[in-house]
Amino acid sequence: MEKVLILAHRGRHIDGIKENTLDAFCCAMDSGADGVELDVHLLSDGHLVISHDPTLSRLYGAKERIHDLPFCRIKEIAADITELPKVFETLGPVFFDIEIKADPITDTRISDILYSALEAFPDIQRNVMVSSFNPLAMRRFSSISRNKYPSAIIYDREKTTPFYLRSSLGRLFFDCDFLNPKANIASKEMDKHPSYRFAPWDVNMLSDAEIFVKKGASALITDEVLLLKALF
């Protein structure tokens, strides 16, 4: 990546548009984003759908865990949720940061299915980064893809995050290309690991964005696309 990419975190979800939906992704691209960050879950029938949470409770008021449901049931509960291939078909070769959500954390089947999905869309393959908090899922993905796609470990220092996912040590489990720390720790992490490329997330302040750009960030993952586009 030769320029600093502005990636819309779960799309641009404003004015009643739900996150991680086709509407949110299209809104992001219409707003000038270079691409989108999105989250993928594996369903019980092998479909890949876009959703951040492991359940449908927060956005759709249903307590079921996503990985327990088939796609037909998902659509009955949450019509806005879409499959990953549909996103590729709709957006075309924009940049995608695809975050793997493995549920449970030891289940890495999603890595195989994601690789197959990417292989079916050659037009977008040069514009993909695959990332996760989960080093086991990333190790599996890197292994089966033979490092064809840039890969990243995501991390933060939040108390709600399991302690073993609060550092960049997950990078040691696989051939990691990018480090994706949360913005509030990114500056120190960039100084600490100069040999890695960086795509910080939760970059919602111009002051942070300017620092990360000066330090050589490759991408900025943001909820404030219009604000950050003012830098370029």
Image: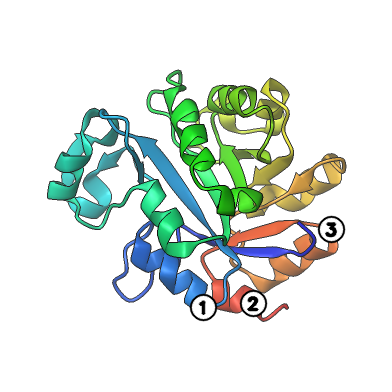
User: What kind of residue is marked 3?
Assistant: Lys
Measured in 3D between alpha carbons, the distance from the residue under mark 3 to the one under mark 1, in whole angstroms, is 25 Å
Q: Which residue is mark 2?
A: 229
- Secondary-structure class at tag 3: loop
Residue 204: % across, % down: 58, 66
Is residue 214 shown above or below 111?
A: below
Decide which of tag 2 and tag 3 comes sooner along the chain.
3
- Secondary-structure class at tag 2: helix
Q: Quadrant of the N terminus?
A: bottom right
Q: Which residue is mark 1?
A: 31
Q: Which residue is mark 3?
A: 215
Count of numbered tags: 3
Kindly indicate the quadrant of the structure image that contains residue 34.
Answer: bottom right
Marks 2,1: beta carbons within 8 A: yes
Circle nearer the viewer, 2 or 3: 2
Q: Residue at x 42, y 42 (%)?
A: 40
Residue 194: % across, % down: 87, 43
User: What kind of residue is marked 2?
Assistant: Lys
Marks 2,3: beta carbons within 8 A: no
* Category of crowding for the residue at label 1, using alpha-carbon neighbours closer than 10 angstroms: few (below 14), some (14–19), many (at least 20): some
Q: Residue at x 80, y 61 (%)?
A: 2
Measured in 3D between alpha carbons, the distance from the residue under mark 2 to the one under mark 1, in whole angstroms, is 9 Å
User: What kind of residue is marked 1?
Assistant: Ser
Q: Residue at x 37, y 60 (%)?
A: 19
Residue 76 - label: none
Q: Quadrant of the C terminus?
A: bottom right
Q: Residue furthest top?
A: 106
* Category of crowding for the residue at label 2, using alpha-carbon neighbours closer than 10 angstroms: few (below 14), some (14–19), many (at least 20): some
Is residue 167 shown above or below 205?
A: above
